[in-house]
Amino acid sequence: VPAALFELAAEPGQGYHLALTTAGDADYDLFLLRSAGPAATRIVEASQSRTIGAQEVAEQIWFKPVAGRTYLALVRLVSGSGDFSLSFSQLAGPLPAAQWTVIKDDDGEKDSFWGQVCSSTAALFKELVVPDDPANIARVMLQYEMGVAPYDPQSQKHLDRGAPADKQWCDLVISLNDTVILQRPLDEVAGVGWHEAAFDAALLVRGTNVFKFTLAPGGNDYFYMCIDLNSAYDRSYCAINGKIDRTTLRPAVNRHVGPGEYMVRIKYQKK
């Protein structure tokens, strides 16, 4: 099954757990979607594991719904073949206590949305320094904030302001230390606000880790990363026409923005 969507009977204020198991060599991703109507559905959490050697990350999501929203689970086949089983259960107690370590350079306030990428020859880079041994990390999430909805240059409309409903958006490609950890259409993973994506802690290194945000080859839609202009540690930079440029945070010729830091973080739980 390439993809399946399930509406969840979730009551506000209760805690819930989604768990995905697979058969064969199938690799499925699990997404939690929240909807306020047909035109306002967005991913609020994702579990997208990658198998590295013998290590495999379980596809699980815990959440507590808010009133006035419909929640859905999306299961999507990434590779291989085989069936899947999705369990959905209400927790008897509170959500699991999570002691998260957050690695970030920003102060939490977005001052600019001009981390703008318009082609696959441009990219944003964010360095994050991890002090712990990745072997001791059980679960890790990438977090990033977008300031403006994706833009379609053909219709000259944004996703939330009139872009064609049947528009096939380019893929956002996120890599960590030169390994792709997420590739999805912009309308799924680059809407306004914060996004989270799980990835395998085995891809981290103790010390400096480099995240890259770009478009899939040939892509020419736009996305807009938020920037904190009050923090500057020289750990955010861009590429323009394939060349690294540390003097600006907006990869467009003669469009200087900075200094500052892209609103990109990771959070992790230790074993």
Image: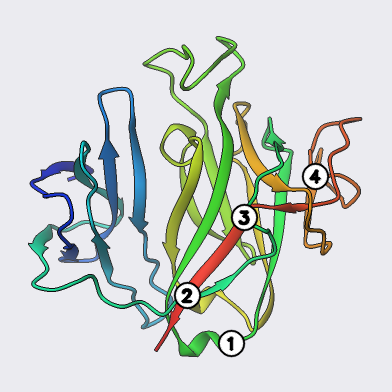
Q: Which residue is mark 1?
A: 132
Distance of label 1 from label 3 (alpha carbons): 23 Å
Q: Earlier in the sequence, mark 2 or mark 3?
A: 3
225 left or right of 199? right
26 left or right of 161? left
Distance of label 4 from label 3 (alpha carbons): 17 Å
Q: Which residue is mark 2?
A: 268
Q: Secondary structure at mark 4?
A: loop
Residue type at tag 1: Asp
- As drawn, the label of residue 108 is 3
219 left or right of 141? right
Residue type at tag 2: Tyr
Query: Looking at the image, which residue is at 32% across and 22% down?
Result: 39
Q: Secondary structure at mark 2?
A: strand
Residue 271 lies in what quarter of the image?
bottom left
Q: Earlier in the sequence, mark 1 or mark 3?
A: 3
Which quadrant is the N terminus positioned in? top left
Residue type at tag 3: Gly
